[in-house]
Image (cartoon, grey):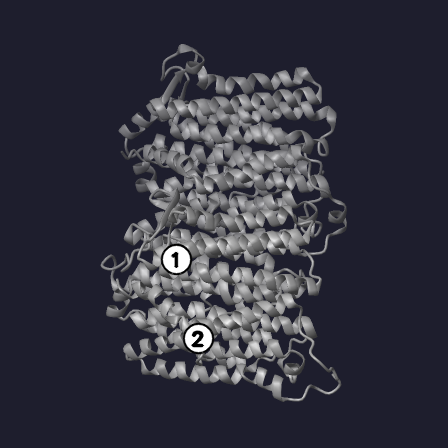
């Protein structure tokens, strides 16, 4: 029985838990409760993935209304994979949160943090699970609005303009997406994705479909911070509370990429997107430009959270580059990098949270010599950094390997060379931090710092450890990603 | 002990050493004894593989698949066997030497130093025993990263700048070119296993193979082929034992080892010889030999001179690979061991002189033989071996390399090898000769013998003796390596 209702429970549990946090009021209670809820959600997503792997795609009609009239939740392998890592990271980050929040958010506001966090998680999970376009938009708004609120909780006064900037940009993106969905609805008279996919392919050469596609791709690109539509991201990540940055950086943009995958491959179909609209000719160059520009900008940042934010923009570039190949290998690389980068960046931002807690700063000058004072935190950071560079033994290598293979497969060796060269930029921005942290005399702040509390170190190391585990043992991540890619491309 | 167990142990032991070092960091004597014990055990384990490999066995161990069809796998063959023995054997000697050097110098962060050292040996042994190109690449990078803290050890601006150059060049070449070459090979051949006779023959046209060879040769930055050699002199800011083991033995040899391994097992020497695609590499190596020797002559700093000498000597091995005939391959491979013993002796001596007298410049070392006769004599032995004069081990590898060059009808290269030997004499011999026969500089009226600590002098005599012993046991090395030349 429960097994049957898993898809709806996946959403319902965090959604209902969010207002309960308001009722609990007390910070400790609300935090404990949300930790329990997040881990439950994670357990359910594991169960879902196992079931999907066993029986194939699951469809769940909401309230018993059959599709295409009612809303349907549709869990295929890709959805289950996204659910798994979004809820997994959600659980790990919330476990890490209490100690980190203690220094960043006043006690009386913390239950509100829990509420918005759970709402944001609900929204992100909902996007991944729904098979209905309008429902997708609703979840997108839930997650976006709550993430604006989360960002504005930041200690610095600059968090407010950052959140506002994100709000404006995010709303434009959401509006574009809504217009796109509206046009599609007008054309096909359905909001169910599977149904729409059948109908849109039946009617060829409609100008409205082209316009809808354009609106959607621009709107989604904005939400996933694809260069040059990334302007909102660095400020938002830099000024949000550490916990929020870790969570959003690991999940929010990734889920937007999922939306892109759904629209391009499931709704419009490869033929339309890549042959009629030549999406690859748009995405590929933008992705490469994003990788190089954002990595270069990252090199010059003094605020390390901001530096990592720019690095995120670059990493989105890798993911999109993988998608733009529109081949099984490329798509595998893109999807696996969704997962890999979520772990790397989540872990890195959590390590930054430890540093922010002990140093009260995330400036590179204050991080001088911190490696000796906080060895566990900094070694986690260094390991995560190696993942960003794409060193073997870490997940970053696995992603890079697939991207290069995909490029070589279709004979685009200059792209392969560019991908490798871009790793060197990552090397520069990662290594300047490592060098400063380990081989310089401690700064005033670092001299007084001590190791971060275990309550934060353990979750950080869980994610960073995962980057190594999944760098060596790839059958889960690559296996699922490859099958998801094959499903998306309709290949056997 | 079965071959697979031995391989597993050989990989695990250095990691154990690193862990033990960190745990026991508070008690220096216990820490270093533990390192020594583990190093000894590692050498024995590696040695236990030797009889089987000599008899033609190829013990293997497959750990797990990192990517579909690509596993972290190990397979012991003669070349790797030789490299693993050299690296693990000299680790023991270097650890002894480190104890003397680091303590006499009151260096800080010694725990980090010994731990990183052990991880570096892990990288070297893993690379030596690797069964496919991916595994080799993984350990190659482990070696790069783990040696960075050793190079930057002093934490001064100069040390950090040197370490930055070190890391930048090594990672740029390996990520930018080597990884591309590996991925490309995978795409063309569908496998990355090391197979005698190569995996690329008939899989791609000559142009592609030529480009691949270029990517492999220059992508292996550790081989220090010009113009990617700058990291080696830059890394000389490291403490001398690091320079000794890592920059005369483990790191640089991992580089030339990779080149040799790729030539023998990825391309196959027949392919390169029949197509003539490696001729350009011979000349690049030849040019590196000459230019680096000439630069070495201009250096007054002893370690810098040795660094350029290393660059020049490494290209002997690359040259051997590029010749792609049996003499060349065997001579080049043999040179891995011969040069290791010679050069590590020279570095040990440089460190001993520094510990005892704080002298780094060659011009200050006149008359050094009067106060440090044992060290200076060992330096002479090491120098003779590097030059390639009998009765030192280095003479054999140069002999085979010359035969290889003759066999390939490359008389220009024969001439280069001869000139290079003369240059070696010119920049190495003056140091011991002036040490013994020149008067000490004015003002240093020191009488009597004042050597470095025993922990420094014994290891350097041990390796010097090794140079001599290798001359007489070259036949065994030859028999070990002979299968390389038969596809």
Which residue appears at 25% of the width and 60% of the height? B201
Indicate the quadrant where residue A115 lies: top right
Which residue appears at 47% of the width and 77% of the height? B385
Q: Which disc is residue B426 wearing?
A: none
**Is residue A17 rendered to the left or right of residue A317?**
right
Of B316 and A287, the residue lying toward us: B316
- Number of marks in picture: 2
Residue linked to disc 1:
B50
Residue B277 sits above or below residue A72 on the image: below
Residue A42 sits above or below residue B63 on the image: above
Which residue appears at 67% of the width and 53% of the height? B28
Quote the CA–CA distance across marks 1 and 2. Answer: 22 Å
Of B25 and A93, the residue lying toward us: B25
Residue linked to disc 2:
B394
Depth check, mark 1 against mark 2: the one in front is 1
Residue B231 lies, in percent from the top left, at 53, 66
Indicate the quadrant where residue A28 lies: top right
Question: To which chain does the residue with label 2 belong?
Answer: B
Of B211 and B387, the residue lying toward us: B387
Question: To which chain does the residue with label 1 belong?
Answer: B
Q: In the rendered image, is residue A11 in sight?
A: yes
Classify mark 2: helix, strand or loop.
helix
Residue B260 lies, in percent from the top left, at 37, 64
Which residue appears at 72% of the width and 31% of the height? A102
**Is residue B196 rendered to the left or right of residue B180?**
left
């Amino acid at each position: 029985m429960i097994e049957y209702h898993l898809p709806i429970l996946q959403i319902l549990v965090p959604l209902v838990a969010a207002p309960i946090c308001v009722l609990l009021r007390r910070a400790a209670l609300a935090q404990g409760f949300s930790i329990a809820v997040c881990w439950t959600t994670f357990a359910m997503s594991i169960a879902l993935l196992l079931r999907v792997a066993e029986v194939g795609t699951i469809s769940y009609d909401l309230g018993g209304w059959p599709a295409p009239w009612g809303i349907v939740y549709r869990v295929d392998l890709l959805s289950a994979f996204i659910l798994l890592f979004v809820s997994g990271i959600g659980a790990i980050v919330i476990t890490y949160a209490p100690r980190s929040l203690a220094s960043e958010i006043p006690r009386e506001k913390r239950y509100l943090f829990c509420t918005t966090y759970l709402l944001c998680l609900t929204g992100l999970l909902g996007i991944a699970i729904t098979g209905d376009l309008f429902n997708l938009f609703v979840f997108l708004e839930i997650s976006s609005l709550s993430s604006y609120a989360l960002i504005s909780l930041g200690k610095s006064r600059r968090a407010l303009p950052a959140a506002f900037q994100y709000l404006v940009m995010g709303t434009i993106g959401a509006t574009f997406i809504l217009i796109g969905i509206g046009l599609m609805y007008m054309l096909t008279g359905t909001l169910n994705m599977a149904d729409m996919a059948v109908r849109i392919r039946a009617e060829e050469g409609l100008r409205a479909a082209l316009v809808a596609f354009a609106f959607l791709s621009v709107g989604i690109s904005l939400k996933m911070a694809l260069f040059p539509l990334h302007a909102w991201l660095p400020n938002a990540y830099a000024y949000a509370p550490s916990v929020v940055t870790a969570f959003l950086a690991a999940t929010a943009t990734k889920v937007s990429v999922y939306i892109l995958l759904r629209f391009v491959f499931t709704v419009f179909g490869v033929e339309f997107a890549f042959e009629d609209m030549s999406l690859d000719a748009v995405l590929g160059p933008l992705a490469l430009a994003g990788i190089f520009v954002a990595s270069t900008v990252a090199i010059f940042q003094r605020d390390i959270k901001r530096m990592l934010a720019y690095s995120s923009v670059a990493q989105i570039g890798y993911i999109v580059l993988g998608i733009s190949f529109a081949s099984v290998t490329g798509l595998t690389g893109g999807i696996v990098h969704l997962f890999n980068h979520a772990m790397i960046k989540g872990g890195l931002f959590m390590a930054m949270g430890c540093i922010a807690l002990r140093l009260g700063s995330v400036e590179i000058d204050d991080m001088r010599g911190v490696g000796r004072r906080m060895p566990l935190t900094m070694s986690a950071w260094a390991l995560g950094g190696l993942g960003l560079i794409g060193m073997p033994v870490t997940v970053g290598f696995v992603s890079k390997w697939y991207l290069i293979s995909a490029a070589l497969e279709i004979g685009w060796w200059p792209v392969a060379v560019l991908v490798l060269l871009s790793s060197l930029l990552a090397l520069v921005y990662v290594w300047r931090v490592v060098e400063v942290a380990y081989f310089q005399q401690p700064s005033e702040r670092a001299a007084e710092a001590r190791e971060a509390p275990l309550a934060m170190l353990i979750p950080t190391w869980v994610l960073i450890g995962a980057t190594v585990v999944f760098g060596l043992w790839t059958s889960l991540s690559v296996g699922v990603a490859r099958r998801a890619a094959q499903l998306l491309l309709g290949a056997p | 002990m079965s071959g697979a167990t031995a391989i597993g142990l050989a990989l695990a032991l250095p990691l154990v050493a690193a862990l033990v070092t960190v745990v026991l960091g508070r008690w220096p004597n216990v820490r270093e004894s533990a390192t020594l014990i583990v190093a000894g055990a590692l050498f024995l384990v590696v040695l236990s593989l030797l009889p089987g490999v000599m008899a033609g066995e190829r013990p293997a161990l497959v750990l797990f698949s990192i990517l579909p069809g690509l596993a972290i796998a190990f397979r012991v063959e003669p070349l790797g066997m030789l490299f693993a023995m050299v690296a693990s054997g000299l680790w023991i000697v270097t650890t002894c030497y480190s104890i003397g050097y680091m303590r006499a110098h009151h260096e800080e962060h010694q725990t980090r130093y010994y731990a990183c050292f052990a991880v570096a040996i892990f990288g070297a042994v893993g690379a030596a025993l690797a069964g496919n190109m991916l595994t080799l690449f993984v350990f190659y990078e482990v070696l790069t990263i783990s040696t960075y803290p050793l190079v930057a050890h002093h934490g001064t601006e100069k040390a950090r700048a040197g370490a930055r150059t070190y890391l930048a060049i090594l990672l740029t070449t390996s990520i930018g070119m080597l990884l591309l070459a590996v991925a490309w090979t995978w795409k063309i051949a569908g496998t990355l296993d090391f197979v005698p006779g190569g995996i690329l023959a008939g899989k791609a046209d000559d142009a592609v193979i030529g480009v691949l060879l270029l990517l492999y040769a220059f992508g292996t930055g550790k081989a220090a082929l010009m113009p990617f050699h700058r990291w080696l002199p830059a890394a000389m800011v490291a403490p001398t034992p690091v320079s000794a083991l890592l920059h005369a033995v483990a790191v640089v040899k991992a580089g030339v080892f990779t080149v040799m391994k790729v030539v023998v097992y990825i391309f196959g020497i027949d392919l390169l010889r029949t197509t003539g695609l490696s001729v350009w590499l011979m000349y690049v190596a030849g040019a590196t030999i000459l230019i680096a020797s000439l630069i070495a002559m201009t250096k007054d700093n002893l370690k810098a001179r040795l660094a350029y000498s290393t660059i020049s000597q490494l290209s002997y091995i690359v040259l051997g690979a590029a010749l792609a005939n049996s003499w060349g391959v065997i001579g080049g491979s043999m040179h891995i061991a011969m040069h290791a013993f010679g050069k590590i002796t020279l570095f040990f001596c440089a460190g001993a002189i520094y510990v005892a007298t704080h002298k780094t410049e060659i011009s200050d070392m006149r008359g050094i033989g009067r106060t440090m006769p044992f060290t200076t004599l060992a330096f002479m032995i090491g120098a003779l071996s590097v030059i390639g004069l009998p009765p030192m081990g280095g003479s054999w590898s140069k002999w085979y390399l010359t035969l290889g060059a003759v066999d390939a009808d490359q008389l220009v290269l024969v001439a280069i090898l001869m000139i290079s030997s003369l240059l070696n004499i010119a920049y190495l011999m003056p140091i011991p000769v002036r040490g013994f026969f020149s008067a000490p500089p004015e003002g240093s009226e020191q009488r009597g013998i004042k050597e470095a600590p025993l922990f420094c002098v014994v290891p350097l005599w041990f390796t010097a003796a090794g140079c001599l012993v290798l001359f007489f046991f070259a036949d065994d090395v030859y028999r070990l390596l002979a299968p390389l030349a038969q596809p």
